[in-house]
Structure formats: C-alpha cells, structure tokens
Amino acid sequence: MRNMRCVSMLLGLSNVGLVLIGGFLMLSASPSCPAGDNYSFGLVSVIACIRIGCMAAAAKAQHSTAITIAGHSMEGGTAAITSDSRLERQRRYRRWLWWTRSGMIVNVMQFLMAIYVMLIIVKGFYRQEADSMVCFLGHDMEDIEWKKFVLLSFLVLMWLVAITQCFTGTDVLRWRSFYETHDTAWRAHYREVFDHGIREALCCLGRVKYLSVLEEDEVYSVARLLGDLVAYRATGTGHLELLAGRIPPPSISPELSLPQSMSLCRA
C-alpha cells in the first residue's frame, strides 16, 4: 500500500463506489423500466469490478517486475546480467504489460458505458411520458430528492473515473519506491521498456522474428544505449526538465559506446 500512487488509490475507491451505487440503482429501479435501461447500472458495476481486478493484477505484476529488475541490478550491476536473468526480466515485464493493456481495454469499456448510461438517462428525463421519472426515481415523492442526489453522484463518479483513467497512465505502483536513486536499476528498467517497444514496432513493420529473439541482438544493443541515456531518472529528474537543460546529459555505460551503437542502428 505504501508503494501505491495516490491517483491509484483514488481510482480504486471510485470504482468501489461505482460498484455500490450502480448495484443500488439497479435494485431500486422500478420494474416498469426497460430491461436494457435497468441492467445498464449493473453492467457499469460489473465493469468497475473487472477494473479493480485488473488494477490488483497489474499491481502484483508490476511489483514482481520491479523486484526482479532491482534485485538483479543491485546484486552485481550490469555486468552480472545473464541470459537466465534477462529471460526472467522479459517474462515478468511482458506479464505486467499484458495486464496494463487489459486495463486499457476496460477503460475504453467504461468510457463507452458512461456514454450509453448518459443517453439512457437524458432520454428518460426529457421524454414527455410521466413514467420516465417514475422509472428511475419511484412513486414516493419523499424519496425522489435523495434518489436524484444518488443518481447525480453516480453520473459524476462514472465520468470522473472514465476521464481520469485516460490521463493518469497505467502504473498502479510508484517505480521510484522500488528503484529509489539506484541508476543501475533505472538503466535496466528502461532497457526492458525500449527493447520491447522497438521489437513491437519492428513487428508492426513486418519483422515478426524480432519478437521471439532472446539472445543479445542489435535491438537489445540499441535498447541498452537508450536505457543508459534515460538514467537521469535516478536523480528524480523528469523528461521535461532534461529537455529544459536543468541537468547535464547522462553518461553512457562503458559496456557500449555511442559509435558502436550507431553502427548497430545502421546495420
């Protein structure tokens, strides 16, 4: 829990609120409501439950990835990286990436459901039939006011969750809580990021064979260089601060010189 991002805690609690309020609205809706309109609240709750599960699984995978990378990097530095340790890092990184992308799919589903529920409610409140108000708020006039408040809270929370998740990224935990200021861990982390990203880009360009390569090839060499260039993250400096020139450029690891890496890029 100490490693969680504050926005992750907020989103987790918000999704729990969607589960509770959505279930209440589905159970308290009038039987005269159309089945699709009534079950839409329950569907929002189900998707919120799936989102909570994806966040928990992504946090577990991210924790395992960070512990593996930090452990291998701090035990003996970059020189101690073996083929087995690289394979384990890649496997854990891909598992974490799979869960984060599953969470992105759930985010899209929540956004589409928010639009659908909004259309249902707007259509119900702006129709001329009197049953449209009874469908969501009931017959008892004493309960209408607080049900209006519950329904409004549900709509605000649903849109807040859908929009916030689009801008906060997929990380549930804070990488810095594991790596701190150890530049070897940051180098290893970004090497995996660039290695997998370059291989996926090459796969989209028709070079599918690069996805199954496990030994050190030219892609890994370029990723190693790029990981060294992003080692300034160990000091807590952001990418924009580097572009603004607030810190000196990072040093390159002695394992790979710049001319060697550029020749590999040309190859």
Image (cartoon, grey):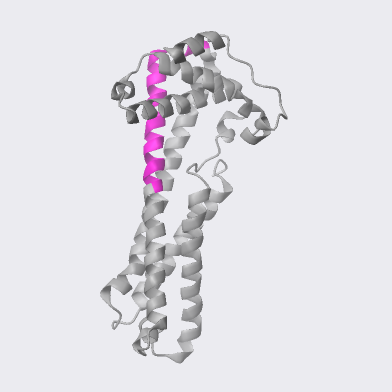
- Whether residue 255 is visible, yes or no, is no
Image spot of residue 190 (x, y percent): 51, 26
Image spot of residue 106 (x, y percent): 38, 51
Which residue is painted at 58% across and 49% down in the image? Answer: 6
Q: Check if residue 42 falls in the magenta segment.
A: no
**Can you say which quadrant of the picture contains the N terminus?**
top right
Depth check, front residue: 119 or 137:
119
Name above or below for residue 112 compared with residue 9.
below
Q: Check if residue 92 falls in the magenta segment.
A: yes
Which residue is painted at 47% across and 69% down in the image? Answer: 155
Which residue is painted at 47% across and 20% down in the image? Answer: 223
Name above or below for residue 121 compared with residue 56.
below
Image spot of residue 166 (x, y percent): 48, 51
Most extreme residue toward the right, as rendered?
Answer: 246
The answer to which image quadrant residue 45 occupies is bottom left
Name above or below for residue 116 compared with residue 228.
below
The residues colored magenta run 79-104
Depth check, front residue: 246 or 68:
246
Image spot of residue 124 (x, y percent): 38, 80
Name above or below for residue 11 compared with residue 215.
below
Number of numbered labels in the structure image: 0
Q: Is residue 34 left or right of residue 92?
A: left
Most extreme residue toward the front, as rendered?
Answer: 266
**Can you say which quadrant of the picture contains the C terminus?**
top left
- Whether residue 34 is visible, yes or no, is yes
